[in-house]
Structure formats: C-alpha cells, structure tokens
Image: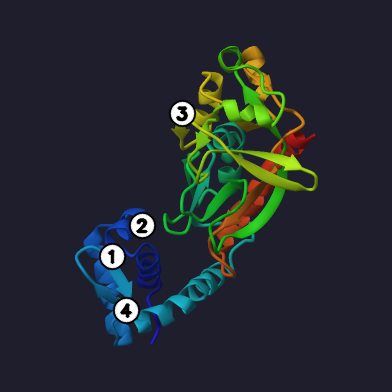
Amino acid sequence: MGLELESLKVFVRVAELRSFTQAARQLGMPRARSSAHVQRLEAELGTQLFQRSTRVVHLTQEGAQLLTLAPALLAHAEEVGTLFQSNRVLRGRVRMELPVRVATDFVIPRLPGLLALHPQLQVDICASDRIAAAKREGFDLVLRIGPVREAGLVGRRIGETTMMNCASPSYLRQHGLPRTLEDLRRHVVVHYAADVTPNFEYREGDAYRELPMRSAVTVDNFEAYEAACVAGLGIAQLPRHGLERHGDRLVEVLPQLVARPSPISVLHTHGRSAPRRVRAVMNWLVEVLTPAVAQAAA
C-alpha cells in the first residue's frame, strides 16, 4: 500500500486548521475535493481520521498518530522527487508573511532574481504588520520582530534593532516633556495590540521592566502605531533605524530609559521536516535581509 501524497497533504492542512473549508481555501481547491481526498485516505488506511461536526473537525486517535508521521513523510517524498533534478531547480509554492515595509523595500525588489533562477517556484507574500498564527494560517515562512511567542517555529535570528522613545511636538506641547520615570504617570502611550496591556518598557540596571500606562488609542499594525505617534496620540517605542524620514515630526524623549532591542528572526513552520523549497527560500531571505539588519543596527 502506498499513500497518495496529495491526500496526505490535504489531511495535514485540515488537521492543522481543524476545518475542511479553510484548508481547501489555502490549498486552492473546492471544499468537496478536500473532503474527497480525506475520505480516500481513510478508505486506504481502513480507519476514521477525523470526527466531523457542522462547525469543526477533531482528530481521532488514529488521525493524531498519522499527523505525527505525515510531515516527515511528505518532506522525504519531496526529497525523493527532486533527487535526480538539478540542484538549482525548485518547484512548488512557498507562502510567507512579512512586515509591510520589509516586503516592499527589501524582499519584493529582489524577488525577480530568485524567480529567474527558479521559474517553477511560486511565492505568495502576505505583507502585513499583524502577527498571524503562522502554522494555523498556513504560512511556510515568517519574519518576526520581537519575541517569538508562537510554539513550533524554527529558524535563525539575523540581528536586532535598537529602540527609541518618541513623541510628536504637538503631543509634547499638550502634555509636557517627560524627564523622569515619575513624569510618565501624567502621560499616555500608543497601545500596540500585540501587548496585553499598555506599558512603557525601560532598562533598570541589568533588567528590563514595564511601567503600566494609560492609552487613548490601540492599533494592530506597525504603520498605524507609528502614524498614531506622529499624530500626537501618545508616546511610542519605535525602532531607531528609519525614523530620520520623519524629520522634525518626531522627537526623542527619555533617552536614558530605552526599551530592550528587538530581535529579528526568519522562521519556518515545518519543524525538522522543512521541504527543500522552503529551506532554499528561507536561506535566500536571510541573505537578502541580513545586510539591511546589520546596517540598521550600526
């Protein structure tokens, strides 16, 4: 008996998303086709892999056992499929999630070179500053700035960016210039939704601490976070590199109380069994972004 690889791929995606509809959407196929693939796999194995309901699907015990083996099986199958091809040939689709500015300024301008080398490669880029659940939403690669809170992501830290406390002149005219930590009690911050509560991070000795703060606005992406600070809606803690484009629209405050540097990492979602195309595109991303990160840290 030999398992059909396409059906196994559909099974893995349905198991990760717990939804035939979402799996079919990500795989670019009708829902009925995704269901048929799983039914074919169940018939071949002689066992039920999912308990189905109207809203969600759950793995059976047998399905959970198969899910522990399937990613490695698929990765090995891909390696066999490319074993006798040129080392330069990459096939298939790679889905990546990148911050908007990283995608537009660094990755997309270099993408024609990658696709010229690998014309059978397809790259999907989700340019967003929202931190997606990478595995659940079906991304192969993600770039993370800051702590990586999602379990199961594997990759490389390529550098870090230093931070700067910023406020707009209009905000400072209204609220005054803070000079000490105690002064911040009379101020507000722009709240980034990824943080559970509004706060101001600062270094004290060898440790970093968080001061709870008030906030009048909450945003869920970096562009809006920066724009809210420029608009005078509160103090923000921004990467120092690139702020020169704002000229005199932003002013540094409390330089002695900076937040910790933010690590920058390129990560994949495939554990120990990343397909060859994913590893290759990840290495390309690291090559493209490392010089930019090093320049930002200088």
Direction from residue 163 to residue 126 in the image, left or right:
left
Q: Is residue 263 visible?
A: yes
User: How far apart are labels 1 and 4 at the CA level?
Assistant: 14 Å
Q: Are marks 1 and 4 in contact (CB under 8 Å)?
A: no
Q: Mark 1 points at which residue?
A: 34
| Residue type at numbered disc 4 | Leu
Q: Mark 4 points at which residue?
A: 49
Image quarter (top left, top right, bottom left or bottom right) of the N terminus: bottom left
Residue at 53% x, 30% y: name it: 190
x and y percentages locating residue 225 in the rendered image? 52, 30
| Residue type at numbered disc 1 | Ser
Write down the quadrant of residue 275 in the picture.
Answer: bottom right
Q: Is mark 2 on a helix, strand or loop?
A: helix
User: How far apart are labels 1 and 3 at the CA level?
Assistant: 45 Å
Residue at 21% x, 69% y: name it: 53
Q: Are marks 1 and 3 in contact (CB under 8 Å)?
A: no
